[in-house]
């Protein structure tokens, strides 16, 4: 993976990590909805021994369901928790992006956002999960040490996020939990979409401000988060088709968005992009922060980012469905965070430590201190 200009400009916000998995007889082309429809995932996909081909074309063979798993990126760890496989997670990142996950006695396999290859090798896991923001060099070293590493591909939609969940379930032998998690995600999304359906012809325009003019483009799951929540992404109006990019301040003023949305995590006053303060949204106080960990990681909790936006933009409609969302979580969510004591209180959320989130869908790299903040978001994947 070449990480040059894009990396110097960014880091990791909202993006990144999933590709269809060719596992034990499952077509890599099958999407999440098709796979969910074919009997139960536990019967159809969780078969060992099995072979799994990842986004790099590498095929790993697993004789049995892994008893020890290392997650190299926050989204990998989050998915393990959400599908109920956290008991097999022996190593995971320890940084602001995993602050809402229970570290417990698991080994930290990162120094900040950098993978500690020797630490991972020492754990000798049965399989290593690597979101696509993982440095190629780290993956190569781990494979040379004899470890089975599964690298996920880029995820550009919520369906890709769900596919990533199912793939993780197949790899670790937790297909029932993965299927239930995807069903939980879909039901939550249906409730939230229905709440905004009456305004489908007149959606408020929103600018997702990632600082310095950067925003999420239409080829990203973050774009789908915005549109699913019932707002129009300004990036689509100005023709930004990449996963992320920059919008000129004059375009922001000209389009005059109804809402300004930005990631949480910055200390003090948020450093809005030039032009934002001249918009109707800013003048009327239609400015909101969305949890950066939920918004930037291609993992199940992305549904909470959708909820935050609906709650702010459509408060009346949200009030009518809030009880249903709570009931759904209590009845169907696999992982109950209330049962875990968060021992990773790093006052930060996924995005920040002063971070400057820029969704790079796959190219996180350590940059100069002044840019480091921005890289946080990308690495979260």
Image: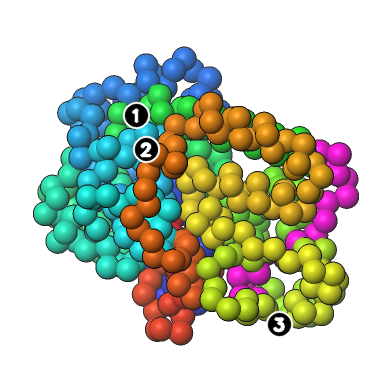
Residue 29 seen by the camera: no
Q: Residue at x 64, y 48 (%)?
A: 306
Which residues make up the magenta segment? 197-214
Q: Position of residue 376 (x, y in %)?
A: 45, 68
Nearest to N terminus: mark 1 or mark 2:
2
Q: CA distance from mark 3 to mark 2?
A: 41 Å
- Mark 1 touches mark 2? (CB < 8 Å): yes
Location of residue 48 by image quarter? top left
Instruction: Describe residue 241's horizontal placement relative to residue 122 as left or right.
Output: right
Instruction: Describe residue 175's horizontal placement relative to residue 33 as left or right.
Output: left
Q: Quadrant of the C terminus?
A: bottom left
Q: Quadrant of the N terminus?
A: bottom left
Q: Position of residue 52 (x, y in %)?
A: 30, 35
Q: Which residue is mark 2?
A: 168
Numbered disc 1: secondary structure? loop
Q: Note whether 270 is above or below 19 in the view shown.
A: below
Numbered disc 3: secondary structure? loop
Q: Which residue is mark 1?
A: 174
Indicate which disc residue 274 carries. 3
Q: Residue at x 47, y 15 (%)?
A: 39
Q: Residue at x 34, y 66 (%)?
A: 113
Dot 3: few (<14), some (14–19), or many (≥20) neighbours within 10 Å?
some
Numbered disc 2: secondary structure? helix
Q: Position of residue 120 (x, y in %)?
A: 18, 55
- Between tags 1 and 2, which lies in front? 1
Instruction: Describe residue 36's horizontal placement relative to residue 74 as left or right.
Output: right
Dot 1: few (<14), some (14–19), or many (≥20) neighbours within 10 Å?
many
Q: Nearer the viewer, residue 345 or 232?
A: 345
Nearest to N terminus: mark 1 or mark 3:
1
Q: Residue at x 20, y 35 (%)?
A: 67
């Amino acid at each position: 993976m070449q990480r040059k200009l894009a990396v110097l400009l960014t880091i990791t916000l909202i993006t990144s990590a999933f590709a269809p998995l060719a596992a034990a007889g499952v077509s890599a082309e099958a999407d999440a909805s098709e796979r969910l429809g074919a009997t139960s995932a536990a019967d159809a996909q969780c078969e060992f021994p099995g072979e799994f081909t990842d986004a790099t074309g590498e095929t790993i063979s697993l004789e049995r369901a892994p008893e020890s798993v290392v997650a190299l990126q926050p989204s990998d760890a989050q998915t393990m928790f959400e599908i109920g496989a956290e008991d097999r997670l022996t190593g995971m990142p320890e940084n602001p992006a995993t602050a809402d996950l229970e570290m417990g006695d698991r080994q930290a396999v990162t120094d900040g956002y950098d993978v500690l290859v020797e630490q991972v090798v020492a754990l000798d896991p049965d399989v290593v999960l690597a979101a696509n923001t993982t440095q190629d060099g780290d993956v190569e070293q781990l494979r040379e040490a004899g470890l089975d590493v599964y690298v996920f591909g880029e995820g550009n939609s919520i369906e890709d996020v769900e596919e990533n969940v199912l793939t993780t379930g197949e790899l670790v032998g937790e297909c029932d939990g993965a299927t239930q998690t995807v069903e939980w995600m879909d039901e939550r999304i249906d409730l939230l979409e229905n709440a905004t359906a009456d305004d489908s012809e007149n959606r408020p325009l929103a600018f997702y401000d990632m600082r310095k003019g950067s925003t999420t483009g239409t080829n990203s799951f973050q774009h789908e988060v915005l549109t699913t929540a019932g707002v129009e992404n300004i990036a689509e109006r100005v023709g930004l088709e990449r996963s992320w990019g920059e919008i000129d301040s004059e375009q922001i003023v000209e389009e005059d968005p109804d809402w300004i949305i930005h990631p949480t995590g910055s200390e003090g006053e948020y450093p809005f992009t030039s032009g934002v303060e001249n918009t109707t949204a800013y003048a009327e106080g239609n400015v909101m922060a969305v949890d950066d960990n939920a918004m930037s990681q291609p993992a199940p909790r992305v549904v909470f980012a959708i909820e935050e936006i609906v709650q702010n933009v459509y408060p009346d409609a949200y009030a009518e469905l809030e009880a249903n969302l709570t009931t759904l979580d209590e009845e169907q969510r696999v992982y109950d965070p209330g049962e875990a004591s968060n021992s990773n209180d790093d006052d930060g959320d996924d995005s920040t430590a002063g971070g400057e989130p820029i969704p790079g869908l796959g190219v996180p790299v350590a940059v100069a201190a002044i840019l480091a903040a921005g890289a946080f978001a990308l690495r979260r994947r």
